[in-house]
Image: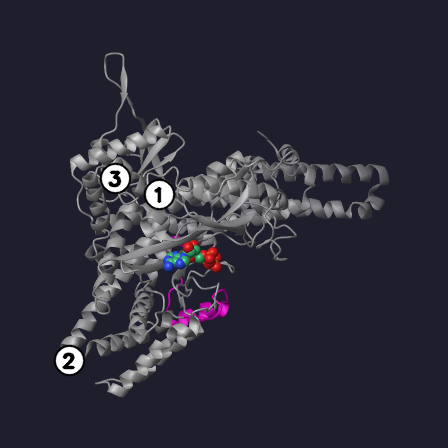
Amino acid sequence: MSTNRFQALSELNYRQPQEPEAPKKRVSEYFGDNVFAYFKMREYLTDDAFEKLMDCIQNGSRIDRQTADHVAAAMKEWSIQKGATHYTHWFQPLTGSTAEKHDSFFKPIGDGRAIEKFDGSMLVQQEPDASSFPSGGIRNTFEARGYTLWDPSSPAFIVGNTLCIPTIFISYTSHALDYKMPLMKALHAVDQAATAVCQYFDKEVVKVNTSLGWEQEYFLIDSALYNVRHDIAMTGRALFGARPAKGQQLEDHYFGSIPERVLAYMQDFEYEAHLLGIPVTTRHNEVAPNQFELAPMFEEANLANDHNQLVMDVLEKTARKHNFRVLLHEKPFEGINGSGKHNNWSLSTNTGVNLLKPGKNPKSNMQFLTFLVNTIAAIYENADVLRASIASVGNDHRLGANEAPPAIMSVFLGEQLSAMLDDLEKNIKAGKMTPEDKTVLKLNIGKLPQVFLDNTDRNRTSPFAFTGNKFEFRAVGSSANCANAMIVLNTIVANRLHQFKKDVDARIEKGDDKDEAILKELQRLIKMSKAIRFEGNGYSDDWVKEAAKRGLSNMKDTPSALKVWKQKKVQEMFDRLNVLTPEEVHARYEIEVENYIRRREIEARVTVDIAMNHILPSALSYQSRLVENVLGLKDVLGAAEAKAATKTQVDLIKEISGNVNAMKSAIDKINLERNKLSKLDVEKQAEGYSLKVKPLMDEIRDNADALEMIVDDENWPLPKMREILFTR
Ligand code: ADP
Ligand code: MG
């Protein structure tokens, strides 16, 4: 492993694209090979056990012990046949990554022999020694027990030689300690609320599913360079580095041809993903150099989210094989684009209708408008909660940083739809509607699909955009668990739909007919939520001013964004919909604030370390050389003549001193500030890290980056941005 910049750079000369391991077969021949999909279960299970399992998955019925035993035996047989020796409950604790604790199938039976054992009780529940996962005070240490419980709705899979069983993670007191449990509850909440509303239009609808199609952006850098950039290795982002002359200004990377070494990596990675049944279909370069994107076909949200968690893992593991490291941080490099994870979201019925796709006739379009308008209204009512769902230390660098969606939540609809809503708003009159009024309105609504079936009208600057048959939530961070955003989005939409049902029913009770009641309620919501709709350039300063005028909030950092979780009305909403109890909300709030502090603390310490121990010594040693040169010239030329001859050197010496002093003074201030903060409560600490420590880190960086432009290249210890971003 390389220990300095030049050694690392020389390793790059020997890099060759690795021969991909992916077999030259059709994907359909091995897709899902490592997944115990339902159609495979059918082979292994009795009809009765299979039916009970399906009933559990589709209708949430309980699984009895006997069925669990059957399923466990089937899983064991299938996975051992495929070479598995271990099993693990796979879960998503609030650390943000996934966790697993492998146990062996093999069990000694006492007479010198051993058997492979895996039964229903081992499948259904485990008790990992979980006291070191974040719990936000929910689990007192004296009962530091957490349980993982099997989620039958997400199929088991094999990684390496381990059978992985997707599970939820809860405390002894049944509080959620993970992302999966509240996600499943939020999906259930929106299912119930949306199904009830669908009943106005179609009595056949008994279930509404949420679909999620994520797009994952990431950076790749060579592992040799990664290893000598401690900042990137420890914090996921470059804390130092002068901007390279060439960044993304030529726009030559986006959709350019994929470098060979990267392509080999992608092929391997896709192979692994396909074995796991993850329907990855899209790959391309992104806007910034060394930035890429992949996207699968959308799936049911719980499964899609598991798949995204897995993908992040596979991306990292495969990268190492190809001498790359993958950076999932939201903003690894200042001055070029950051990475997001667009969450494409929609609702669809058991009858196969996408509720966010315009229909063919007035009735189906009424249904479409109902879900569209209620979604917009939900965002309007709970923009701050949605903002909080994407708050993280990494995303703070991305949101509002001129090429990412702003921290202001708004909804983009496109010209035609906006016009349609404006029309509805104006043309529904108070009081009883005449039959002619209704006919005209219905005709207009009926025209909808033709207008924008192939509407490619896109606004890339909007955080929440309607894209023809779904909404795309673009503000989600690239390293985030999508569940955080999906829990909030589905909960606030469920909340809105419940209210809609109540309000429409009330209008019907007062004598309106159904269509009239729905139209009037939609009109009211369109008026109410108008401020959240924005069609213009979300990256512009004008929008920031305009949004302030409209009363929309613009919470620029995580500590202020997270505060919404303390609001009683927010906690009550999550409680009412049975997604999170007030204790759980509070625990999550605490964990996220803590996480913010810890991450910034690490960044601050690494900043100080690199500035003091790497950059300052290099700058001073270069300065000494300049001093020697000046003294030498004086000796040779004499003071009078040397004055002119040493001008540049003397200027540089002074410049270096200026930057070094400024850097050192910011370092002293950071140390002092951190010391002060450590005595405050967590909320104040988080604020301090955002408002005081972060600006000091920037100051250190500015001076260090200035030094990088002065100091002899041979003397510079850290791989430079141009080396990191343009070597393959
Ligand atoms: P872009 O990069 O232009 O935003 P892509 O075509 O890369 O668009 O991504 C679109 C994403 O939207 C894909 O992941 C796709 O699976 C997903 N998607 C398409 N239809 C739906 C839907 N009904 N619900 C959820 N996601 C969807
Ligand atoms: Mg997208």
Q: Residue furthest left?
A: 509
The image position of residue 36, as x and y in percent, is 33, 38
Task: Pick whichever of labels 1 and 3 is earlier in the sequence.
Answer: 3
Of tags 1 and 3, the one toward the viewer is 3
Task: Check whether the beta carbons of the residues at disc 2 and disc 3 lie within 8 A of each other.
Answer: no
Between residues 35 and 14, which one lies in front from this camera angle?
35
Disc 3, SS: strand
Between residues 253 and 28, which one lies in front from this camera angle?
28
Q: Image quadrant of residue 190? A: bottom left
Q: Which mark is residue 150?
A: 3
Q: Where does label 1 land, which residue?
A: 679
Q: Amino acid at mark 2?
A: Gly
**What's the magenta region?**
534-559
Quarter containing the C terminus? top right
Of tags 2 and 1, the one toward the viewer is 2
The image position of residue 348, as x and y in percent, is 31, 60
Q: Amino acid at mark 3?
A: Trp
Q: For residue 267: magenta?
A: no
Task: Pick whichever of labels 2 and 1 is earlier in the sequence.
Answer: 2
The image position of residue 14, as x and y in percent, is 65, 33
Task: Pick whichever of labels 2 and 3 is earlier in the sequence.
Answer: 3
The image position of residue 392, as x and y in percent, is 40, 50
Image-quarter location of ligand 1: bottom left
Q: Amino acid at mark 1?
A: Lys
Between residues 78 and 482, which one lies in front from this camera angle?
78
Task: Check whether the beta carbons of the residues at disc 1 and disc 3 lie within 8 A of each other.
Answer: no
Q: Image quadrant of residue 447? A: bottom left
